[in-house]
Image (cartoon, rainbow, N blue to C red):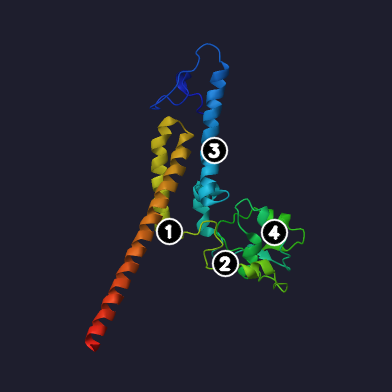
Amino acid sequence: MSDLPGNNNLLFSVNSPFNMQLATHGMTILDFIIPFVAGIFIVFVMTFVFNYFYGQGAFCRILCPYTIMLVPFMNLSAWQKKITRISNCTGCRACSDNCPQGIDVSREIYHYDGKVINKECIKCYHCVDACSSQTLADSRKKAAPQTKPIHIYEKTPWQNSYKHLQVIEPFHPVLDVILIVIAIVCGSITSRLGGFWFYVGTIGGYIVFRRLISWLLTEEVHLQNRKIITKSQNQMGQKKTMVT
């Protein structure tokens, strides 16, 4: 709300292409309602919309500068400390339900040798505190074996190495960096409306361009598959001709 109202009794920043003049002498009820609604809209875009596309805590996981700087050091080394299973997991899922990053901790330690390997883990220890069975600890030691099978995890296991991530669309790191740069440029453009609008443009730009690149990559894969199928059909046709 720091930019609402803007300078000279305007609703938004002076540089905003659209604006609204507020009362110059004495604030009215409308002068409070309009900035409040605008602020709610901004918070809605920053939270609900981004979380809808990219899961719980999406802004902190993807666009927060601290995350971008620290994620290369998280859960990479086999000897690095990780959230680790030190006794049998009961499958109560208290750890997963209390993870602010939205990591399915219980399923993670079940399928990945008792370790949380998700790079979105920020070591807040909410999962450790939530576990009444004292199953988890931050350790580099080998995890305790899980001798009690959890049938729900055996029945619906993850299908690939990316399934434990909230967003299953693995991009090359270079593409991810390019997307973040594009998002910041979009935010810089919308920041003409005021400081908070930087986040609206950044989040909107990130979602739009990420989905666009995802679509282009999918189309490229389909095109390659069609070429392979066509080539195979031509080869089969040539073999049939030779046999004939």
Packing grade of label 1 (10 A; few <14, some 14-19, many >=20) is few
- Of residues 230 and 109, which is closer to you in this image? 230
Which amino acid is tagged 2?
Trp
Please say whether residue 120 is visible from this viewpoint. yes
Q: Position of residue 43 (x, y in %)?
A: 54, 37
11 above or below 208? above
**Disc 2 target residue:** 158
Find disc 3 in the rendering and name its residue: 44
Q: Seen in the image, is 182 located left or right of residue 56? A: left
Cα–Cα span, label 2 and label 1: 23 Å
**Among numbered discs 4 and 3, the one appearing first in the sequence:** 3
From this view, report whether residue 159 is shown above or below residue 126.
below
Q: Name above or below for residue 202 compared with residue 27.
A: below
User: Mark 1 or mark 4, which is nearer to you?
Assistant: 4
Distance, label 1 to label 4, CA atoms, is 31 Å
Check disc 4 and report its element: helix, strand or loop: loop
Please name the amino acid that badge 1 sits on: Pro
Mark-to-mark CA distance, 4 and 3: 29 Å
